[in-house]
Amino acid sequence: MSALAPRIPRRVGLWLFGLPAPLVARLAPSRHAVRDNLRHVLGAATPESEVRRLVPRVYRNQLMNYFDMFAGPGMRPEEVERSVRLVDDDETAEALAVLESDEGCVVVAPHVGSLDLSARLFTLVASDGLAVVEHLASDPVFQVVCDLRRQDGLEIVSADRAGVAILRALRRGHVVFLAADRDTTDSSVPVDLFGHPTMLPDGYAQLALRTGAPIVVAASARRPGGQLEIRCRVIRTPPETGGEGDGSYGGSGATDSPGDAQRGRAVRALMRQVLGFVEERVREDPDQWVLFTRVWPEPIPEQQ
């Protein structure tokens, strides 16, 4: 597929990959998780017919993301720039200035739109980047996925061995990519998302506090014609509250001292800013939130 996809015109490829979405949405075991996630976003009062209407669109968007992942290695930088557009506003201009500087930053993104093409565009801007990804159960499949994503100076590292690599990348002024809405680092903490309690990763906040690196939170959305549109927001970290330690990152841990309590409050404040942006973007494009595991432990009953 990685050899064939680059030969297919992008619009045709996106259309072809999206065709099976209605069938996949009816048969995939993950459809129940997708439906429950959507209901948390849309609210319990939303008619079930509206939730069910969006489920196939979630799968269609993810299938199109797969096309972009397979086609990515054959896309020249100018093709990436034509396929991905940064929104022209003050927040994005500030984010671009951070990415183009040599200070290093943490890019935090929800699973909205295409993470692969978004990361590739950011890497073209920033020259070098490190993406932390979840290790798949199958090592050969994981290696294939990493090879597809490892382009234009983007290094891929498994979350279970990322600590030292992340700190080294930031010291070199590189960009580190982390997920906002799925824990790949065993550092989840209790938070509210869309008004409902759940557990989400705090590794990016811990890392930003430890290193002083700014956070660029970003989300893409696929628009008519297949072009991706990216919105960004820069979140600056408060003053240094700890050292780099042993190379591990994430995990708020217990708050046994005033310093721990202060750091915990700083972590929660950063997370709230990041998750506020995530909520804005997911509310705008709920069918492009491509998560296929339950985000919340408690399901919302279906409305009749």
Image (cartoon, helix red, strand yellow):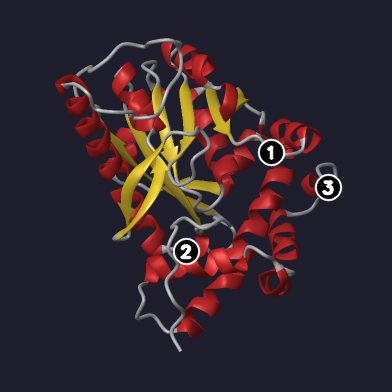
* Mark with earlier residue (2, 3): 3
Lower sequence index among marks 3 and 1: 3
Which residue occupies the foreground of this view, 227 or 105? 105
Q: Which residue is mark 2?
A: 37
Q: Amino acid at mark 3?
A: Met
* Mark 1 residue element: loop
> Disc 1 versus disc 2: distance between alpha carbons?
22 Å
Give the Cα distance between marks 3 and 1: 19 Å
The residue that mark 3 highlights is: 1
| Image-quadrant location for residue 99 | top left
- Counting from the top left corner in percent of width and height, residue 289 is at 50, 58
Q: Residue at x 51, y 58 (%)?
A: 294
Helix, strand or loop status at disc 3:
loop
- Identify which residue, 299 or 282, lies in the foreground: 299
Callout in the foreground (3, 1): 1
Residue drawn at the location 50% of the way across and 85% of the way down: 49
* Disc on the earlier residue, 1 or 2: 2
Percent x, y of residue 153: 60, 22
Dot label at residue 136: 1
